[in-house]
Amino acid sequence: MRNKLYFYLLIMALVTGVLEKAFSGEENRPSAQTVIARSDAVRNPDRPFRLDLRLTEYVDSSERNEIILRVYSKIDRTSGQFKNLVRYMEPPRDLGKAVLMNGTTMWFYDPASKSSVRISPQQRLVGQASEGDVITVNLAKDYSAKLVGPHDGETLDDADRKPRKCWHVELTPDNDVAIYGRVEYWVEKDTYRPVKGKFYSDSGRLLKIAYYHKYQEQLGVFRPSEIILIDAVNAKLATTINSSGIHAMDIPDSWYQREFLPHLKVE
Amino acid sequence: MTTLIIAARNITRNYRRSLMTISAIAVGTMSMLLFGEFVSQIFVALETQNVVRSGHIALFRNGYYKYGGGNPAAYGISDYHSVIRSIDEDPVLKPMINVVTPTINLFGIAGNFDAESSKTFFGLGVIPADYNRMHRWDEHHLKLSSSADEPLNEKDETHGFIGAGLARILGLCETLKLADCPERQGGDQETVRTESGRNRRDFSGLADDAKGTDSNAEKGLAPRLDLLAATANGAPNVVNFYVDKAIKQGVKEYDDSFVIMNFNLAQQLLYGRGEKKAVSIVLQLHRTEKIPVARARLEKLIKDKGLDLETRELTELQPFYKQAVGMFLAIFSFISIVMAVIVLFTVVNTMSMSVMERTQEIGTLRAMGVKRKGIAGQFVLEGILLGLIGATVGIVIGSVAGEIINHAGLIWQPPGQAYPTPLLVRTKGVGHLLLGIWTGLGVMATIAAWIPANRAARMKIVDALGHV
Amino acid sequence: MAENPVVVFENVTKIYQVGEVSIPALKGISLQIPRRRFSMILGPSGSGKTTLLNMVGCLDQPTDGKIEVCGEKVAEITDDRISEFRAKNIGFIFQNFNLIPVLSALENVEYPLTLLGMKTSERRERSMSILESVGLSDHARHRPNQLSGGQKQRIAIARALVKGPSLVLADEPTANLDSKTGAAIIDLMHRVQEEYGASFIFSTHDPQLISHAQDVFSIRDGELIEHRSEG
């Protein structure tokens, strides 16, 4: 009888031990998809928000161009992707121009002509329009994730040459509208902060490299306030994207209609 | 002593005048013949060029020809392998066909970013073996040799040709050893638009990964370009493209944007991870005149299998060809009319003078009992003789002149052609042209003689007799 | 007269219309010209003599009146029919010889027979024969520009007679010949008249020819003034 009790106690201990291990494994080894989902959450708030972006373009490491945008972002309930309404604030000659990104469609609005034109995928191959894709991409929604590095992470230098322990994840598209053929992503272990991303085309060529750093508290979460985008096709090009002034706000769905563009009021 | 003999003798009566008339007609005939042969040569050359480039018939998705130019990916032919197989196995079509092959049309941006150059391009994706075979088509035995003779790379999928203008714009003059390619000059420098001046940031440590593409040294001497395009699903895509050669295209817009690449590479670029399709299926026949038969058969095939395809033939695929042919035909017709009018006036003039001089003779003949139509017939016959002798002489001289021209080594550059070619006139297979000119001028001379001949016939006998 | 006259005019009038002006050339002439004789039409210029001859030769139509030649009413028939009539029945001799320059002497003589559709061999034979009669068989292949005036007129006579016409019209046949040649021509014409039995009608000023006239018709101002007949 006493042996049976000891036996049961041993089993219990073992079982609890295994369960404990399992639980702690859940804490220390999340699924790749979870890693991505949580890193997405680090980058972008889950409620509608407004923020200011400063895009600086560098050619051969020399500053060439700078614009300031105000972005109104909201997650579309059906697609799970971000809808973005972008307004140009600076330089003054671009003031009033707007871009509407709704799913895969992009519209450009010019107050001088009061008309909006659709930007075709061909026109988004190079230039500012090509950068928008990287920032707003909602990876968890459109891609399947797979851990390719060690479970407890590999060491990688971030944009400031500081070594970080990161989960190395590979993403493959889940549907036809996912833009990239493949993504390599490094997410800092335990903080779920994205450190680096490499974005590949369907043909397997590297299109862009993104570095996420200068983490600051924005809307209750530490988010990257600067993203460095390096163009892998045109090796002389690089862009830095600085975000600031993030506000949560209610944004009506009507703002994301092409017809609404001429009615945007200057704030 | 037939009317013919009398007519012949009457022609030699005023030797100089007849000679002048015959000469005028001969020159007119010769001009028509030479120009006609020149135009025939152009037609044959144009036909060959265009058949070589785009085949005889192309199959597209319905609507592509009119609306698909801006978005070829949307008009892809899904099951092109089976369509090609059906065509290949069709008993009516098979003997007529030289090549049947799928192709892709796409456009995007070609970049030589190391040289800070990029340009929109129009790409044609072809299967190199088929393309090279199409290039050897020579139904008219022209044996046109040009630099385009170098075959498209059949071994390496990533290789191809671009237009000379595109090569120049992308800064590949030296590497591709292009002639007529001065140092880039002019243009505005990109303005710096920041107020803070030229700040610098060092991205060098971060950008090392970006240089992961093959370097030139690996691939030998062919310079590398990035070809960017949006896939059918709207995603940005880019492939490496190695330029074997820059080939001058006849039309500048074409020359500045033309890329010809491997079909598989084009598929990879245009369709990405999506279903790999073709944009068109091109047929090159053995003989151009078979186009209507082949096209009818294709339409039947399409209808029987319920395919969503349409056919377009040579003149629709190459509207410039049709326009050029139309223009030359118009010019030739114009020249023919002018020549015919000249013959008309010449013969009318000569015969009128002849009639006037022979007024008393006409009266005598009428007195002797020759009827009106007999008189008219006599003069008409003389006119015909002048016309036909002149035409025959003209054709003989024209034929000789044609041979001289063909051996004179003249060259010219026709519109739409990239390189100068020998200036030739077509002397073979133009029998119908010769016959047409000869007969036409004969008819013209008949009509021309008829006016004064009629006048002669209607003369009052007593007035004619009294005419000194 | 033993036979029917070769030419009958019944009240023949010819008026020429020149713009708004009417010129009457013949005013209701009636006459009969006998067969197988040398008949002459005499009259000053402007008398209508030429017009009369043209009517006789069926080269022109009268404005009014009836004309009968060789028994045929020729006043109102088609141009083609009258051409045929002339080809068969009338031979012409002109002041200027009017030979076809591109034809040889023989071919000129043959021409009327060609018009009548005669076979080549027969045509050749007849023509050579008459050429011999006028003494020019040696010149058969010569062109008119190689012949003298007298020779040409002899060819013309041969041509006029080769088809054996009922009627021969001669308009000033001796005008361009010297008197000696003229006399020879007149002799020839007599000979062929006897040989072929043709009726000769002349218009002439030549006194030598007139002296051979058997019938003389004088015309003045479009009217027949006199008809003298001898034997």
Image (cartoon, coloured by chain):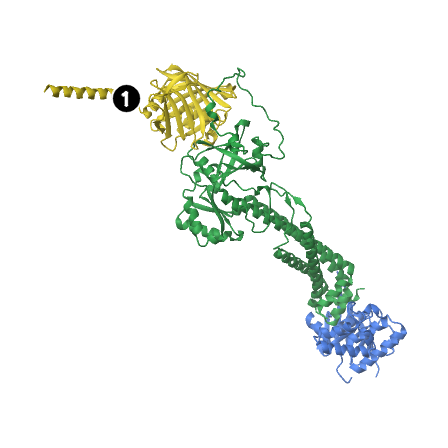
Q: Is residue B460 left or right of residue B272?
A: right
Give the class, few, some or many, for how many residues have Cα within 10 Å of label 1's Cα (few <14, many ≥20).
Answer: few
The residue carrying mark 1 is: A26
Q: Is residue A186 visible?
A: yes
Q: Nearer the viewer, residue C57 or B226?
A: B226
Q: Which three-letter amino acid code belongs to the residue tagged 1?
A: Glu
Relative to C139, say whether B80 is above or below: above
Q: Nearer the viewer, residue B466 or C51?
A: B466
Query: Residue at horizontal 74%, vertical 57%?
Result: B21
Residue A73: % across, % down: 39, 22
Relative to A224, say whether B310 is above or below: below
Q: Based on the displayed image, in which of its 4 quarters is residue B27 positioned?
A: bottom right
Q: What is chain B's hue in the picture?
A: green
Q: What is chain C's hue in the picture?
A: blue
Of the 4 image quadrants, the one containing the C terminus of chain A is: top left
Residue B18: % across, % down: 75, 59
Q: Secondary structure at mark 1?
A: helix
